[in-house]
Amino acid sequence: KPALCAGCGGKISDRYYLLAVDKQWHLRCLKCCECKLALESELTCFAKDGSIYCKEDYYRRFSVQRCARCHLGISASEMVMRARESVYHLSCFTCTTCNKTLTTGDHFGMK
C-alpha cells in the first residue's frame, strides 16, 4: 500500500521520498511553511507545533538567543559580537554615547 504524502495528501509512488517528523513527503512537497523554500536539497529542516521550517525562518521565529541591544532574535548564520554574557548583532554593538560601531579590538566599557 503506497504511503500518503504529508504535504499534498497524494500517494507516494516515487522511488525516492523524504522522511521528516515521522511523516513521508514527495520531494517537491517538503517546504518551509513561512518562505516556501523547497527543503529537498537542504541539509536540515525544523519542526514546531506541526509546522516545517527552513533553518533561517526557524531561528528567526524561535531563536533563543536575542540581541542585548535590540532584543530581536539572532539566527545561527549571523555574525555576532559578544561582551561578557551578552550577544549583539554586529550593527547593534555600538557606543551608547556617540553611536560609533565597535569592532573586534576596540576598547569599551560596560555598565
Image (cartoon, rainbow, N blue to C red):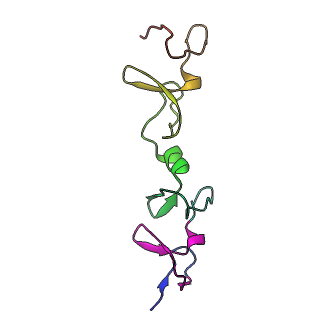
Query: Looking at the image, which is closer to me, 5 or 27?
Result: 27
Looking at the image, the residue that sits furthest to the bottom is: 1
Q: Is residue 87 left or right of residue 31?
A: left
Give yes or no for residue 21 being in the magenta stretch: yes
Looking at the image, the residue that sits furthest to the front is: 15
Give yes or no for residue 76 being in the magenta stretch: no
Above/below status of 89 relative to 93: below
Above/below status of 104 relative to 23: above
Query: Looking at the image, which is closer to me, 85 or 44?
Result: 44
Position in image of residue 34 (x %, y %): 59, 56
Identify which residue is drawn at 60% across, 71% down: 28
Position in image of residue 29 (x %, y %): 58, 71
In the rendered view of the protein, which quadrant contains the N terminus? Answer: bottom left
Query: Looking at the image, which is closer to me, 103 or 101?
Result: 103
Position in image of residue 47 (x %, y %): 45, 59
Q: How many marks?
A: 0
Above/below status of 62 relative to 40: above
Identify which residue is drawn at 51% across, 24% down: 69
Looking at the image, the residue that sits furthest to the left is: 85
Identify which residue is drawn at 46% across, 34% down: 66
Q: Is residue 109 left or right of residue 90?
A: left
In the rendered view of the protein, which quadrant contains the C terminus? Answer: top left
Query: Looking at the image, which is closer to me, 14 or 53?
Result: 14
Q: Is residue 100 left or right of residue 16?
A: right
What is the span of residues highlighted in magenta in the rendered image?
10-30
Identify which residue is drawn at 60% across, 62% down: 38
Above/below status of 58 relative to 65: below
Position in image of residue 85 (x %, y %): 36, 24
